[in-house]
Amino acid sequence: MPHTTARHPSPYPSSSSSVYPSLEGRAVFITGGGSGIGATLVERFAAQGARVAFIDIAEADSRALAERIAAQGTAGKQGKAGTAAPWWRRCDVRDIAALQAAIADAAAAIGDFDVLVNNVASDDRHALEAVTAAYYDERMAINQRAAFFALQAVVPGMKRRGGGAIVNIGSISWQIKQADFPVYAIAKSAVNGLTRTMARLLGPHRIRVNTVTPGWVMTERQKALWLTPESERDIERYQCLPDRLQPDDIAAMVLFLASDEARMCTAQEFVVDGGWS
């Protein structure tokens, strides 16, 4: 059986334990928040006392996540009353009208958004010769187009709020020349262009835009579909650090960038990959 932890356990905790007082009460919208990295983001923002809304196509996972957070009675690290349960809706981000309607409805429920995390993605493997125009468009609709139109939808509210933070989730796949999902790699390579252009455009409104680029994060999906003894050896060969990346490692960077502690960070890419790229 392949292992998913370092040979010698890390002495450092992997959970996002930092407290950001500025996130208390902030309104946060997360795409693809029902499972994987997205679910961890929802949980970690809720634990900071933020008012969280998310969308995902996975209805069962999303409902379970919202119920779990509600059962925990999240009140925030500062002891003030936070949101008992996140606002959520099943939404296919390929439908831009539905995506933007969900953002509008969530804002009506919990307020204009201070933070947007463009997390939704699908890294299904595909061969070059098998890609059709329809498949290409569908992959772009999930992995590229949704981020632009989610950003477009939250910006008016951020302007009313006097600022905000947008975090786009990238990928090291195209940077390390991973070849088994070319359309996904193309889409993810565009994330930095979105970040830098929008940072310049929105900076005068104190809206910060950054990219967080994960390495190979050990979500349940990744472990079930693609983690093999051979790929374990690749991790050991190419990462500088011996530990396996966890969703919490990505959440820690996103929380920082969403907080006021990162108030002068914008137009940047922050790579969290254990030193692989």
Image (cartoon, grey):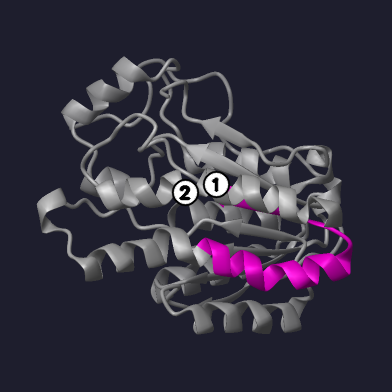
The residue lying at 60 percent from left, 34 percent from top is 270
Tag 1 residue: 193
Q: Magenta part of the protein: which range?
A: 147-169
The residue lying at 49 percent from left, 43 percent from top is 247
Seen in the picture, residue 245 relative to 55 is either above or below; the reply is: above
Three-letter amino acid code at disc 1?
Gly
Quadrant of residue 267 within the rendered picture: top right
Residue 84, position as x, y percentages in the image: 71, 70
Q: Which mark is residue 264?
A: none
Query: Is 155 part of what is drawn in magenta?
Result: yes
Residue 153, position as x, y percentages in the image: 65, 73
- The answer to whether mark 2 and mark 1 are in CB contact below 8 A is yes
The residue lying at 45 percent from left, 33 percent from top is 245
Q: Is residue 71 visible?
A: no
Tag 2 residue: 190
Three-letter amino acid code at disc 2?
Ala
In this view, which residue lies farthest toward the left?
Answer: 129
Query: Is 121 part of what is drawn in magenta?
Result: no
Q: Is residue 208 visible?
A: yes
Seen in the picture, residue 75 relative to 2 is either above or below; the reply is: below
Seen in the picture, residue 148 relative to 55 is either above or below; the reply is: above
The residue lying at 71 percent from left, 49 percent from top is 199
In whole angstroms, how far apart are the C-alphas of marks 2 and 1?
A: 5 Å
Q: What quarter of the picture does the N terminus occupy?
A: top left
Residue 260, position as x, y percentages in the image: 84, 45
Residue 216, position as x, y percentages in the image: 38, 36
Q: Is residue 119 left or right of residue 266?
A: left
Task: Judge the density around disc 1: few (<14), some (14-19), many (≥20) Cα neighbours within 10 Å.
Answer: few
Magenta part mainly helix, strand or loop?
Answer: helix
Task: Judge the density around disc 2: few (<14), some (14-19), many (≥20) Cα neighbours within 10 Å.
Answer: few
Q: Nearer the viewer, residue 271 or 15?
A: 271
